[in-house]
Image (cartoon, rainbow, N blue to C red):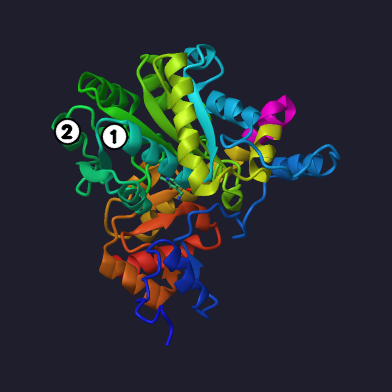
């Protein structure tokens, strides 16, 4: 008998499990709207042209070797990543107040940041939005933080519960950590307006809460890297401290390369360098040092102004296709006369639409129409194309009538 015979089978991950179910469905009409990755109009994964070129350049450079890189990752990559999210003219960067560590994509950056906070920050409560990306509570709980929720989404308006948010953060204990989606909130696609961000910032600063930004979609939401970094930059412009987890999965299409960065913006250069020394002590016993390839691709692109420019064009292309799918889906539902107000589809932003469809309707659409999505009614707009919109509209229409 195995020494592991007492091990129970774990359930599939609620998000990744959608793709497992999709793969097992033999129907030719099947449609996967669960996947959180960009697809072309033809439904295919996309490797950006500029990424292919950067890889060619790396492969053709004989001086490149496969030595270990430092615990904190590639220095160039870290500097350029901080510049990308904070802006080229950021005083925090000029004053060397930012500690940046290359991590394993967005998830790894969140986890390393959480482990650092658990060890070195006086408050171990973290407030996360309700709802949020399903992995957030698990990442923070396993790092030893205690997770609380703040109100975020109002099902009645399919928009922001701004009063609820202000009340809940207003009632948070002083010093509590607050997780904020920098843009393109997942799963709701609902972001605060710049005016609302300003009020959130004032509240967070007046209560000495510690903002922890999750920036998984910079440039991917609006098509502009600067617009999507607005929230983060206002929290850095006020001179206060914050953490930022950055991912290059979506905006450079580097999903499987696992490339991201954790930046901790501090009050002084002295504090930042001490903080960095401690973050390295978190990383060393966990995975020793990060991988070289993905970060080299990113650094190559960010360093070269032609490549950078080409990247912004390809990035805008992805964002624009998603925005156009929102419009097409909305128009088709209206044309069909499907009951309900579907304007949230064009108001929401980023990869996902939070449709408002309930669990039973989702089950119905999967069973009868072979359309796969998470049970909260979230659909990936990137998984949709002009060709598949009519099938989705048929299914939604049948589900709500
Ligand atoms: N945060 C949010 C809000 C996300 O949607 C995702 C990706 N689904 C991540 C973080 C992390 O993704 P990755 O680890 O692949 O960068």
- Does residue 227 appear anywhere in the picture? no
Name which residue lies at 53% across and 53% down.
37
The residue sitting at 44% across, 41% down in the picture is: 112
Q: Where, quadrant-wise, is the C terminus in this rendering?
A: bottom left
User: SS at mark 1?
Assistant: strand
Q: In the current view of this chain or complex, which residue is farthest to the bottom?
A: 1
Q: Position of residue 211 (x, y in %)?
A: 33, 29
Q: Which mark is residue 178?
A: 1
Q: What secondary structure is the magenta-colored segment mainly?
A: helix
Give left or right: position of 214 versus 310: left
Query: Toward the viewer: 341 or 41?
Result: 41
Using the rendered image of the protein, determine whether residue 53 is visible from the camera's viewpoint: yes
Label 1, residues with CA under 10 Å away: few <14, some 14-19, many ≥20: many
Residue lying at 52% horizontally and 20% vertically, measured from the top left: 87
Q: Which mark is residue 172?
A: 2
Q: Quadrant of the N terminus?
A: bottom left
Q: Could you say where residue 207 lies in the image, as x and y percent from the top left?
A: 20, 23
Give residue 145's quadrant in the image: top left
Q: Is residue 225 above or below residue 118?
A: above
Q: In which quadrant of the rendered view does residue 297 lie?
A: top right
Q: Is residue 372 above or below residue 27?
A: above
Badge 2 element: loop
Residue at image location 38% in from the left, 47% down from the top: 186
Q: Is residue 188 left or right of residue 163?
A: right
Tag 1 or tag 2, which sits nearer the N-term?
2
Asked if disc 1 is less than 8 Å from ligand 1, the answer is no
The magenta stretch spans which residues?
Answer: 301-312
Counting from the top left corner in percent of width and height, residue 190 is at: 33, 41
How many other residues sit within 10 Å of disc 2, few (<14), some (14-19) or many (≥20)?
many
Viewer-proximal residue among 97 and 120: 120
Measured in 3D between alpha carbons, the distance from the residue under mark 2 to the one under mark 1, in whole angstroms, is 9 Å
Please provide percent x and percent y for residue 69. 66, 38
């Amino acid at each position: 008998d195995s020494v592991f015979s007492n091990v129970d089978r774990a359930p599939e991950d609620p998000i990744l499990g959608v793709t497992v179910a999709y793969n097992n469905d033999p129907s030719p009409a099947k449609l996967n709207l669960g996947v959180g990755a960009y697809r072309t109009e033809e439904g295919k994964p996309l490797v950006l042209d500029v990424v292919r070129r950067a890889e060619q350049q790396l492969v053709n450079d004989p001086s490149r070797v496969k030595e270990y890189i430092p615990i904190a990752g590639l220095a160039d990559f870290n500097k350029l990543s901080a510049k990308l999210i904070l802006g080229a003219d950021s005083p925090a960067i000029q004053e060397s107040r930012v500690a940046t560590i290359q991590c394993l994509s967005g998830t790894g950056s969140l986890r390393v940041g959480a482990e650092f906070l658990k060890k070195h920050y006086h408050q171990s409560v973290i407030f996360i939005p309700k709802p949020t990306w399903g992995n957030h509570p698990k990442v923070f709980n396993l790092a030893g933080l205690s997770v609380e929720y703040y109100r975020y989404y109002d099902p009645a308006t399919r928009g922001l519960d701004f009063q609820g948010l202000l009340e809940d953060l207003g009632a948070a204990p002083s010093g509590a950590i607050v997780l904020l989606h920098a843009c393109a909130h997942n799963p709701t696609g609902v972001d605060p307006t710049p005016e609302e961000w300003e009020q959130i910032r004032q509240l967070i600063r007046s209560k000495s809460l510690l903002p922890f930004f999750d920036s998984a979609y910079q440039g991917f939401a609006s098509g502009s890297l600067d617009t999507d970094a607005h929230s983060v930059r206002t929290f850095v412009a006020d001179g206060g401290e914050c953490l930022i987890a950055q991912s290059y999965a979506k905006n450079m299409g580097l999903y499987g390369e696992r490339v991201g960065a954790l930046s901790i913006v501090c009050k002084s250069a002295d504090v930042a360098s001490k903080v960095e020394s401690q973050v390295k002590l978190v990383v060393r016993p966990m995975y020793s040092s990060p991988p070289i390839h993905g970060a080299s691709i990113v650094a190559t692109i960010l360093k070269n102004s032609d490549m950078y420019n080409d990247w912004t064009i390809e990035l805008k292309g992805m964002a624009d296709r998603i925005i156009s799918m929102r419009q097409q889906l909305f128009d088709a539902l209206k044309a069909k006369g499907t009951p309900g107000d579907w304007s949230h589809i064009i108001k929401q932003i980023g990869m996902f639409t939070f449709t408002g469809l309930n669990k039973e309707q989702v089950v119905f659409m999967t069973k009868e129409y072979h359309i796969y999505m998470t049970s909260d009614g979230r659909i990936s707009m990137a998984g949709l194309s002009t060709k598949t919109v009519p099938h989705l509209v048929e299914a939604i229409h049948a589900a709500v009538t």
